Image: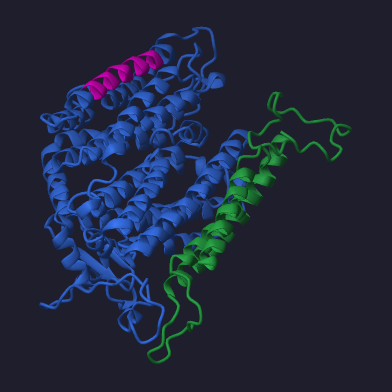
Chain colours: A green, B blue
Amino acid sequence: MSMEFLLASGIGFVTACGIYLLLRGRTFPVVLGLSLIGYAVNVFIFLMGRLWTDALPILVGNEAVADPLPQALVLTAIVIGFATTGFVIELALRSRHESGSDHVDGHEPGHAPGYVPSPSANDGHGGRS
Amino acid sequence: MLQAILDFWALHAPVLSVLLPVFTAVLLLLLGDHDGMSAQGGGHATARLRWRRRLALGSTSLGLVMAAGLVWRAASGELMVYELGEWPAPFGIVLVVDRLSALMVLLTTLIAWPVLWYACGGWDTRGRHFHAIFQFQLMGLCGAFLTGDLFNLFVFFEVLLIASYVLLLHGQGRERLRMGVHYVVLNLAASGLFLVGLAMVYATTGTLNMADVALHVASLQGEGRMLFQAAALILLVVFGLKAALVPLYFWLPGTYAAACAPVAALFAIMTKVGVYSIIRMHWVIVGIDAGEASFTAQPWLLPLALMTSVLGVLGALGAHTMGRLVAYLTVSSVGTILAGVGLFTPETLSASLYYTLHSTVVIAGLFLFVELVAAQRGAACDRLQPAAAVREPVLLGVMMLFGAASAAGLPPLPGFIGKLMILESSSGLPAQAWVWTVVLVVGFLTIIGLARAGVVVFWHVQPDANTHDAGRSPHMLGAAASLMVLTVLMAVFASPIKRYTDATAQQLVDKAFYAETILKRQGGVDLRTTLPYDGSRGPFERPEPLVKETE
């Protein structure tokens, strides 16, 4: 029971953090949010093979083994998630470069597209939106 | 020799439709695309470009022939099952060609050929590796339509999405990057949800093979059934996002309007991947004969589809550019298609499939024409405001009128036939009043929206403004017109197509045949099936599930 509770609440917490970050206005937190959701989903898939303690990872004789299929699935999901995260980071950098803003809408809130903040205003605390 | 090739094809037909685009893409990558934007310059670069175009067009033509072959074979009622790596069905991944899959693959290649031809008119030189990415996109689409395994469906979804991310950005520019960020983030979030749904399907049924899942669902009860239904509805959200169902369609108009014309035209098939997946999941698996889980999506699908149709056409009325107008028509047509799917009778599904064919082709054609018209209008582009007259008002005007009338559903064009089929097949059902009202009102509003656009673009011209020669290439006009010709052919051959879609719907209803063909070897042995791996944890109690470690 305690293990199930720990994992379920852990997945819930990580997902909640991921969704919060996903809804932020800047591309960097959004990418972090996607990664967190990816982690939560991977553990979730893993859990869908049920929790096994003291079970062998491979088949030996007649003893119980942990369900190997979710492990294969989660490996595929991790690989795909890694590739897409790489792509979205590159895309976010490119968008930042083209539009001069790292806001997901491609321009600073309250300013027309193409507005570039002056260097003095960009003192490292401009990440709020 | 020819016989040997045909025999080889007959043996490996399903997988060849997926492998051909991959190998072409790899060859295209090996051929290199270092010149990119400057390809119109030197002789060496032009020769390479010519080779890339020949290779891409040749491969897509071959793909078209093979897809026609798949339809020809599937039309006889044969269910082709291809076991990848010879792993038998519920344990390994299978490709399954039934009538629906074959039809969707044929539709994909039918759209891809004219679109690729159009792109060869210049778009493929405005960025790098257009042809290679295009082939990867085709691979993802064909794979998603052919696979018989839910997790494999996810993998092919990712393949086609990654290709679509790059294609969407083709040509670059701030607007494309901005919409690209939205599109990619939305789809990545949806992928996470897709995995959650799949994991829950696996947890409750112990398998991911579609035929096997469909078998297990009927016997699910209590908590397991509720969990499975939750999984099915989570998957409905994911597929609804791809198909642009209310309230998940907001990403589509901006994205499609920002993409370059050939890409937007190819993306017309992307929403149909969502529709196809909804049919597979919510028709075949949790639709009919699924025990207590039958018709899980019924309370949601029809109302959402009708709302999509209405909101899409309202968006089309309010659009300020032609690109957005056509993109909103995509949303509206998806609504009409899903209304037929959501009525859950074979007749309405058949009508929906016919309408799917038609609306995909018409919308792809309209995207191409919009760009040609925009190029001839100069600075005004595709904004709906008075501007320079187009250089070829008659040809373009007639073609746009043709596409518009077809999209709106005026007789005798196939849009009319498709909508008529949906209306006819829904008569007598409880939701008839809603479906009839929405389909007819949406058709009327579509006419108004398109008529407004036509009046502004072709009649409301500034006589003194300069006109532009761009977009007069007979090559590109021909490519776009060929899609319109295709819609005419669909109207002419409506009867055989309808017979095929009728048979498709009947085949989807026949779940027993589907399960037997996929899960059973030749001979009268029982269906091979799996058990959920949720048994007791103690050793020595459940030796039998240990055989299913290879999916």
Q: Main secondary structure of the magenta part?
A: helix
Residue B362 in the image: above or below residue B288:
above
Within the magenta stretch, is there residue B261? Answer: no
Residue B68: image location, x then y, percent? 23, 54
For residue B63, what is the image quadrant?
Answer: bottom left
Q: Residue B240: tell me if it is visible.
A: yes
Within the magenta stretch, is there residue B452? Answer: yes
Most foreground residue, B80 or B397: B80
Query: As drawn, which residue projects farthest toward the front?
Result: A1
For residue B197, what is the image quadrant?
Answer: bottom left
Residue B139: image location, x then y, percent? 40, 57
Tell whether B350 sits left or right of A33.
left
Residue at 14 percent across and 61 percent down: it is B512
Residue A91 in the image: above or below residue B538:
above
Tell whether A108 sits left or right of B271.
right
Q: Which residues are magenta?
A: B437-454
Which quadrant would the N terminus of chain B be assigned to in this image?
bottom left
Q: Residue B62: tell me if it is visible.
A: no
Most foreground residue, B535 or B506: B535
Tell whether B172 sits left or right of B187.
right
Residue B413 in the image: above or below residue B81:
above
Residue B128: image location, x then y, percent? 57, 50
